[in-house]
Image: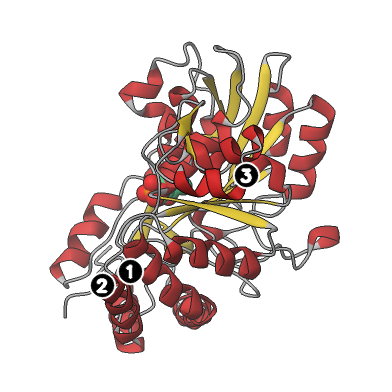
Amino acid sequence: MNVRLFRPTVGEEELQNIREVFDRSWLGLGPTVTQFEKAWSQYIGAPTSVAVNSGTAALHLALARYGFPEGKKVLVPSLTFVASATCILYNRLKPVFVDVDPETLQVDPDDLERKADADCVAMVVVHFGGHPAPMERILEVARQKNLKVIEDCAHSAGGEYPTGALAGRKLGMLSDIGCYSFEEKKGMTCGDGGMLSSPDPELIEPLRAHRWIGIDKDTWKREKGLAQEAAESRHWHYEVSVLGYKYNMNDVAAAIGMAQLEKLDGFNARKNEILTRYLDGLAHIPRVAPLLPYHLSGSSYHMFGVRLPQGERDAWILHLKGLGIATGVHYMPIHLHPLLQREWEGADPTPVATGLWESFLTLPMHTALTDAEVDHVLHGLSSFPG
Ligand SMILES: *Cc1c(COP(=O)(O)O)cnc(C)c1O
């Protein structure tokens, strides 16, 4: 048995949508992207959304929207994928690494509050693993310290906030801007793709130009007050007034996304079944604990992980590999990458994350995983010779 770690689930529905795009022979930024943006906005409860070609691009544009002065600081948890922080560097801002809660592995609001000094302008909040970050405290700190909040929802497409006044709201719609990834390993995929959504359309709309070189085909007509006829004969005209990027989604990716979005709630429901099976099995395996306090209602968990006894991870990886079971590690804290080590000095800024990550192991979880495969992984864990 070979059990994959992640695997997208795509089928006839995606192929049919791609066929329609082919029949139209319009593959670039076009009507299917617009259709996907509308469908996504409706699903997530946003007035408007902007589709881009990756989650990384979404994060870059979200921060760029504010035009923060060079050198200002942005808070980011250290336990995440590097793209949560490279967006800060793209904008010539300085990352400040925030530690995580040892139980939930989500950003620690106390550390956030401690580190949010007068130079901090924003924070990137990650719902790590798909588990909701403690948004009520986070938003309270943001209010006090006057910080913009960007949610990195690469792990949490379709999940809902579970408790309190925000209960039932979709993750990504709790802050200023939500950024999503449709990379192939994420909750739903376009091959590659990303999305920006916000409760405030004025934050999002200007980014349409930024995601497409800076081209804005509509505002020049309005601004110049051209008559309909003159505007039509000038169909070739466009103006570039902002520095944009080649970050647009294309219609082929959007066609895949349309079919995936229809399946997203089903994907998350199937993942909850898989998680339930894993958690039930794990209860009988000493020495292996679940990575997160999984809370399976309205959730959108991106991965399933465990915590192993310190110092044993390599042996567990090899044991599972021998049984055909792929594993991963999510993540080495990002401040330990050489690129980001340059951004801090002195004592480790996030000792909890640094102390814990070497016990983490990610196990296979994707919507095509069968119960037999889950049982095989559980058997692999219980048969570890130790
Ligand atoms: C995957 C990921 C991203 C980036 O998404 P891409 O679509 O691959 O660019 C950003 N943040 C986190 C936490 C991720 O896991």
Q: Is residue 154 above or below residue 12?
A: above
Give the camera-side residue of 107 and 216. 216
Q: Position of residue 217 (x, y in %)?
A: 50, 42
Mark 3: amino acid: Ala
Q: Disc 2 beta carbon < 8 A from ligand 1?
A: no
Dot 1 alpha-carbon crowd within 10 angstroms: few under 14, some 14 to 19, many 20 or more: many
Q: Can you identify the residue that label 2 sits on?
A: 22
Residue 26 location, quadrant: bottom left
Q: Residue at x 30, y 88 (%)?
A: 372
Q: Nearer the viewer, mark 1 or mark 2?
A: 2
Mark 2: amino acid: Phe
Q: From this viewpoint, is residue 107 visible?
A: no
Q: Can you identify the residue that label 1 sits on?
A: 364
Q: Residue at x 53, y 19 (%)?
A: 93
Dot 2 alpha-carbon crowd within 10 angstroms: few under 14, some 14 to 19, many 20 or more: few
Q: Secondary structure at mark 1?
A: loop
Earlier-in-chain disc, 1 versus 2: 2
